[in-house]
Image (cartoon, rainbow, N blue to C red):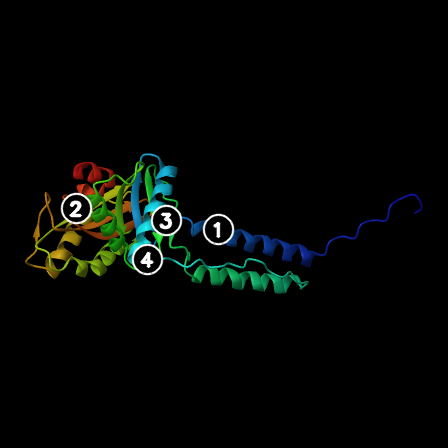
């Protein structure tokens, strides 16, 4: 009728369904991106403590990059091309491509950066995820240099422990992870277990006996020494993730506290 605007065409039900599916896959992709920035299973790196987290992370980046260049050589910068051509395609084709990209992201390594701070959700607890082959080699180089130069290199970054692997905070998973690391404790006479639980219901005592048994079966001659062990297995439960690593001379290195090592060396 004259004087009235023409009625708008009703959207097709199929378009609504396609739009709904697209939003669902976008949410999945967003969650996947978020998860790679959190501490989780399948990572290695450095478990640190700090009295001021933001500054602690900055100091961790500085010292780790410095000594990684010494131990492994300088890392060549990689150019990332994030530009993508936008083509006019049907919605179904776009959804298929988004799902393929999501699968690739989930299957690919979580990060190509040499060092990346990830969320632990524990105050004062920092985890720097890394792609280096052996985190212990870098920590050893840092501590040896501090002791040699007798200089304090950090102010807010306190303790730094090398972590060879992470797993879910499930007893069975932790024991299996410990079994994969026990060979690194060879050629030592005394050992200890450094087990700590943060924000999780698993009991420390439930882990001590089975892990100690793994070490004793592998190295029957090795004795437990809680005061001054030559080698120690780190087992730190950080909420839903357990971090494991092997450290040497834990007591002599003042529990791997970089600040206290420097102060004692003066």
Residue where numbered disc 2 is placed:
250
Q: Which numbered disc flags the more N-terminal residue, 2 or 3?
A: 3
Q: Nearer the viewer, mark 4 or mark 1?
A: 4
Residue visible at 20% across and 36% down? 263
Classify mark 4: helix, strand or loop: loop
Residue visible at 32% across and 49% down? 64
Q: Are marks 3 and 4 in contact (CB under 8 Å)?
A: no
Q: Which numbered disc flags the more N-terminal residue, 4 or 2?
A: 4
Q: Which numbered disc flags the more N-terminal residue, 3 or 4?
A: 3
* Horizontal and vertical percent position of residue 265: 17, 39
Classify mark 2: helix, strand or loop: loop
Q: Which numbered disc flags the more N-terminal residue, 1 or 2?
A: 1
* Horizontal and vertical percent position of residue 107: 43, 62
Residue where numbered disc 3 is placed:
39
Real-space Cα separation, disc 1 to disc 3, in angstroms: 14 Å
Of 22 and 227, the residue lying toward us: 227
* Horizontal and vertical percent position of residue 248: 17, 51
Real-space Cα separation, disc 3 to disc 4, in angstroms: 17 Å
Residue where numbered disc 4 is placed:
132
Residue where numbered disc 1 is placed:
31
> Which of the 4 image quarters holds residue 86?
bottom right
* Horizontal and vertical percent position of residue 132: 32, 57
Q: Can you see residue 169?
A: no
Classify mark 1: helix, strand or loop: helix
Q: Can you see residue 124?
A: yes
Dot 3, crowdedness within 10 Å: few (<14), some or many (≥20)? many
């Amino acid at each position: 009728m004259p004087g009235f605007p023409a009625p708008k065409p009703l959207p097709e039900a199929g378009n609504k369904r396609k739009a709904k599916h697209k939003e669902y896959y976008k949410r999945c992709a967003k969650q996947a991106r978020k998860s790679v920035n959190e501490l989780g299973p399948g990572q290695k790196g450095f478990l640190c403590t700090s009295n001021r987290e933001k500054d602690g992370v900055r100091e961790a980046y500085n010292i780790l990059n410095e000594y990684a260049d010494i131990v492994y050589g300088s890392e060549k910068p990689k150019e990332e091309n994030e530009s993508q051509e936008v083509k006019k395609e049907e919605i179904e084709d776009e959804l298929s491509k988004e799902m393929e990209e999501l699968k690739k992201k989930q299957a690919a390594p979580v990060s190509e950066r040499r060092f990346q701070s990830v969320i632990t959700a524990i105050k004062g607890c920092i985890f720097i995820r890394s792609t280096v082959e052996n985190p212990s080699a870098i920590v050893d180089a840092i501590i040896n240099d501090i002791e040699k130069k007798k200089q304090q290199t950090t102010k807010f970054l306190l303790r730094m422990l090398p972590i060879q692997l992470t797993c879910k905070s499930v007893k069975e998973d932790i024991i299996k992870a410990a079994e994969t690391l026990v060979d690194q404790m060879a050629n030592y006479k005394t050992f200890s277990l450094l087990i700590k639980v943060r924000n999780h219901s698993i009991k420390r005592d439930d882990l001590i006996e089975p892990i100690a048994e793994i070490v004793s079966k592998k190295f029957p001659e090795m004795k437990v020494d809680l005061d001054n062990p030559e080698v120690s297995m780190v087992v730190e439960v950080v909420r839903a993730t357990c971090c494991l690593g092997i450290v040497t001379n834990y007591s002599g290195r003042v529990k791997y506290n970089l600040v206290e090592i420097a102060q004692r060396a003066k």
